[in-house]
Structure formats: C-alpha cells, structure tokens
Image: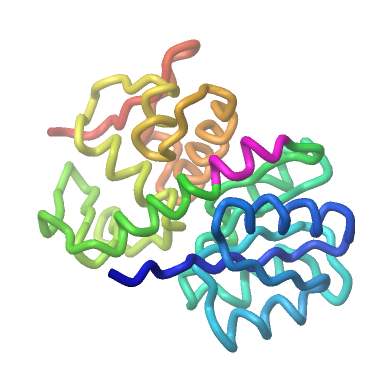
Amino acid sequence: MEIVERRVLVVEDERAIADAVAVRLRAEGFLVQVVGDGPSAVAAVRRAPPDLMILDVMLPGFDGLEVCRRIQDQRVPVLMLTARDDETDQLVGLAVGADDYMVKPFSMRVLTARVHALLRRADKAAAPAPAPGVRLGDLEINQAERRVLRDGVEVHLTPTEFDLLTHLAGRPRTVVPRERLLAEVWGWADTSGTRTVDSHIKGLRRKLGADLIRTVHGVGYALEVDR
C-alpha cells in the first residue's frame, strides 16, 4: 500500500524559525515547502493546496491575515504564528479563517502535536457525515454541508468554529469542560491551550449572538438552546 506524504507549507520570514520548523516537520515525515512573504504564500496555495499551512502574522508584501482572507476558498487548515500574546490579533486571525494559533516563542514538540491534531480534524471533516444535521430552537446545523443558520440566516464559521459548535450542540444545556473540548475537538492531550477554546467561543458569540453560549467560570461552556 502506497503511503502518501502530507504536505505542509511554512510561511515565515524569519529564516532561523522557518528552517527550524522545516527540519522538525521533515523529521516527522512531512513534505515541507517554505516561503517568506504573503504574495508567495497565496501563489503557492493556488498552485498546489497543501494539507496544512503554518502561517506567521507579520510578513513582507502583505500580512498573514490577508493571506487567510485570500485563500479561504481553498479550505486549507491554518496554524497561525504570532509574536504577541494579543487577544485582538488572535481573534482577528480566527475570524479570517485560521484554525489555531501559537505565540512565539513556542515549543517544537507542541507545534508538531498541534499539526498532527489539525490534520486529524481535517480528515474527520472530509469524511462523510453520519447525520444530515440538527435543529435546536432557531439554530440549524447541517453537518453534511457544514452550514449553520440562526433564525434562517446563514452564518459563516471557520472549520474549527463549526466543529466546536457541533460538539456543544451534541449535548445542549450541558456544561462541557474546556479540557474535554480540547481533547475531543482539538485532539490535544494536554491542557495548555484553554485560551484557544476561549478565543473560539468569543468568535462564535460574535457571529451567532452573545446569548447562545453560557460560560461557567472555572469549568467550561454550555449551548443555551432548547433540546
């Protein structure tokens, strides 16, 4: 049986970081391409969409946020890198299509774990949906088409936001701990990314309404809709 190598595009203008990431991912068995600016990133994705892209926010030409905007139609999973632990930057990145983010400096071990987790989620999303969808109050989730409507109006969600909402919708009005969401939606074994969950929840509230998801401080979140 032929083994298909997964392709990762690394978009990073700091050469030392780009080379270190590329070496680590190649050691993990990935085919890696490295580019150093926004226009080259978009061109590379247009030529041959990778299985995943690691994308720095600050780039020559135009930044990583603009790269995300220009490739949204390609459905490429994006792990965004940011030099600042700034919630605004993270929320904007998630809003334009990034699936996850990491703040520099970062652990190569954690980076590769998140790459593997993103690819598993992408594979799961590409598989045939077992059910056409669910309707909870004025919220409609079509799993087969990966579409969401609230009060009859379609809402565009990123792939990660869709997976998170679907997970909460599977147990409406039940509080789901952040750690469980990390394990079952992101596929992470550790709890170092609880702020990632919080950032995606804020994105869902901004798009679907602040009343939809309830926070239980110190525990997790619940979808506040009728069963």
Quadrant in the picture for residue 83:
top right
Query: Would residue 105 be found to the left or right of residue 68 on screen?
Result: right
Query: Would residue 118 be found to the left or right of residue 211 on screen?
Result: right
The percent position of residue 156, horizontal first and vertical second, equals: 42, 62
Give the magenta part as a residue range. 107-114
The percent position of residue 151, horizontal first and vertical second, equals: 26, 55
**Residue 50 or 102: which is nearer the viewer?**
50
Count of marks, rendered view: 0
Q: Name the residue at 77% across, 57% down.
A: 57
Q: Is residue 117 magenta?
A: no
Q: Quadrant of the C terminus?
A: top left
Q: Main secondary structure of the magenta part?
A: helix
The percent position of residue 196, horizontal first and vertical second, equals: 56, 35
Quadrant in the picture for residue 8:
bottom right
Instruction: From this view, report whether residue 51 is shown above or below residue 129.
Output: below
Q: Name the residue at 11% across, 55% down.
A: 130
Q: Residue furthest front?
A: 1
Q: Name the residue at 40% across, 48% down.
A: 208
